[in-house]
Amino acid sequence: MQKLAPIALVLLFLLNGCSQKKEEMSHKFTNALINETSPYLLQHAHNPVNWEAWHPEVLEKARKEKKLLLISIGYAACHWCHVMEHECFEDEEVAKMMNENFINIKIDREERPDVDQIYMDAIQMMSGNGGWPLNIVALPDGKPFWGATYLPKESWVKSLNQLTELYKTDPNKIIGFANDLEKGIQAVNLVENKEDADSYSITQLNNAVENWSTYFDTFLGGYKRAPKFMMPNNIDFLLHYGTSQNDEDVFEYVNTTLTRMAYGGIFDHVGGGFSRYSVDTKWHVPHFEKMLYDNGQLISLYSKAFAVTKNKLYKKVAEESIAFVLEELADENGGFYSSLDADSLDENGELEEGAYYVWKSEELKSLLKDDFEIFKDYFNINSYGEWEENYVLIRDKSKEEIAKKHNLAINDLELVIDNSLKLLKKEREKREKPRLDDKILTSWNGLMLQGLVDAYRYLENSTYLELALKNASFIQKEMKKPDGGLYRNHKKGKSNINGFLEDYASVIEAYISLYEVTFDIKWLEEAQKLTDYSIEHFQDSNSKLFYFTSDDDDSLIRRTIETNDNVISASNSIMGKNLLKLHKVYINKGYGDLAHQMLKNIQGNFDESAQGFSNWLHLVLYENQNFYEIAIVGSDYNSLGKELAKSYLPNSILVGSPKEGAIDLLKNRYNEGETLIYVCIEGTCKLPVQTTEQVLKQL
């Protein structure tokens, strides 16, 4: 490149400065959010509302000025957040009223789940409902007293004016209600330490699953309701339960659900990957946003299901979901972005939900020509697949049925469908893409890392291990704090939010799994270090569970203990499983006792709400059945480990070494010239064997 003379460099600098100023001047309004990195917050940086981010100095300002807080919480892929922004927050008159009467705070719930949890509990107590955008009005100290989700402009203005007037004329009424609500918010977070409780038995678990099964939709999968969320942890546990208990009904339900989700419009047949949920009972019309956390968990789930069933559909879904993540959510540094928006620009230049994904019948006919009739039957370009004069691709018949109808061999049908989908993908890429939320979150990367490890383990594709190692190295390099803890977020080289328990739990789980497929001791050691850090900075000495926030974080009106498994498993249930597995390797560290006590303190919820605690229920199976440590020692440890790992063995942990290893399970087990496999329970081992077939017989 030709070197520029000094005067040219000065001119270039001035021109760049003018260009930047011109861009700033093109916006009529700019608020404090312009200094944030969250794409969601940046979307609001040019609203006329004087938005602030959630920072201690902002809360202090509210206290000094004795102004109410107006806290609005959402995320970048949230459709109704965009609608409310357009109707209310971009309106200058509405903004004027908000600026005069409130300290206005915008929060990205994905960056600050700690704040979101508290105010979501508050609105559910006040109204019985929740969702996003989540709008809360609180006292200057953060205690909430009013909340709403999406409101149109007229209702929004009317509500805020009434609240402002009430605060002026009768502040004690508001203060009294806020104090009472705070007590309720604190109460729902209490967990007792139940040292004298009996362990939860298999009989109790069977009864809990039986009660749970009354909600199963055995025809369409999922639950008998709409909207339908995929709930990966529910199906993951039921896969474990169905196989370990030989429960054919549960196993059939799992397969029905996995198949129907894969057939549904909730799965993107053209580009791969899953949307968040379907608005109907047949998994047809999704809320079109695509989240990293869903896809990471579903890649794990479908990979495990393939290991059990050898159903090629499950393998295909996992592979295509990984391909989607790599194409749309992968950063070149090894991290993964958060989500794609539900909305994109339609043919008229208007933001519309699903515009990128839906098709017109005439368009498909024109593109696919002679293959249209086959494609039409395969993906229901008919009344079953129609949605608001568009079509969302959905299957409801097997390949065999379609092939028979059209007198085709299965291979010929697959060729027609594959070619058609490639053609549609090429055509779809001409459309305006949904907006990308390119922040990188530690916990969601942990879930995706777990997905890649499971895909490598069960689908036996070495590329997935390479991707997993790249992501794990990224977490080590960019998300580790100097004190050994974790950051929550990362964007463009910047990580600035302290990690939450879910960040630690998901990364620890993934590191343990990464060790099992590589036998690289550093991942196990990292998992242990992060676990010890969590015990030091997050554990509640009374309940033995873990707070969601570190003792280094600024205090909120409640320090949350997260126990319910939702779309993502509770951070405490993941930690409980991590502790149990680490106990099998580091047997004298007390991890097992801690996991056991955590389970006893939560198990009172299982009888009536098993689906809300499904990830905890793995621990019930682990404690009531044999949990195996499988140690492989000798020169062939890697190949034998890989061979064993492809079997679905949820009640086990794999360790391996070419000779004497650093952990107790690998000591005094080396026999020169042989590779021996030891099946152990709590460190007590059966006679060593030399083949994986012999191991599986011992199990």
Image (spheres, rainbow, N blue to C red):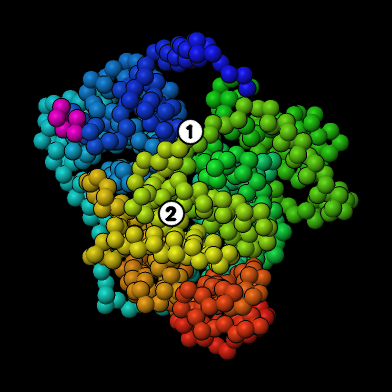
| Residue to which mark 2 is pinned | 566
Residue sitting nearer the eye, 646 or 190 = 646
Q: Is residue 18 above or below residue 109?
A: above
Provide residue 349's location: percent of width, then percent of height.
59, 20
Q: Name the image quarter holding residue 433.
A: top right
Q: Does dot 2 land on a helix, a strand or a loop?
A: loop
**Can the viewer see residue 656?**
yes
Please tell me which residue is depicted at 50% across the width and 13% down the height of the picture.
Answer: 6
Please tell me which residue is depicted at 46% across the width and 82% down the height of the picture.
Answer: 683
Please tell me which residue is depicted at 32% across the width and 62% down the height of the picture.
Answer: 535
Circle 2 Cα neighbour tier, 10 Å, few/some/many (<14 / 14–19 / ≥20) = some
Judged left or right of residue 321, residue 578 is left
Can you tell which mark lies on residue 494? none
Amino acid at circle 2? Asn
Judged left or right of residue 201, residue 406 is right
Asked whether residue 134 is drawn in magenta, I would say: no
| Residue to which mark 1 is pinned | 79
Where does the magenta region start and end?
60-66
Quadrant, the C terminus: bottom right
Quadrant, the N terminus: top right
Residue sitting nearer the eye, 552 or 272 = 552
Provide residue 609's location: percent of width, then percent of height.
40, 62
Q: Does dot 1 land on a helix, a strand or a loop?
A: helix
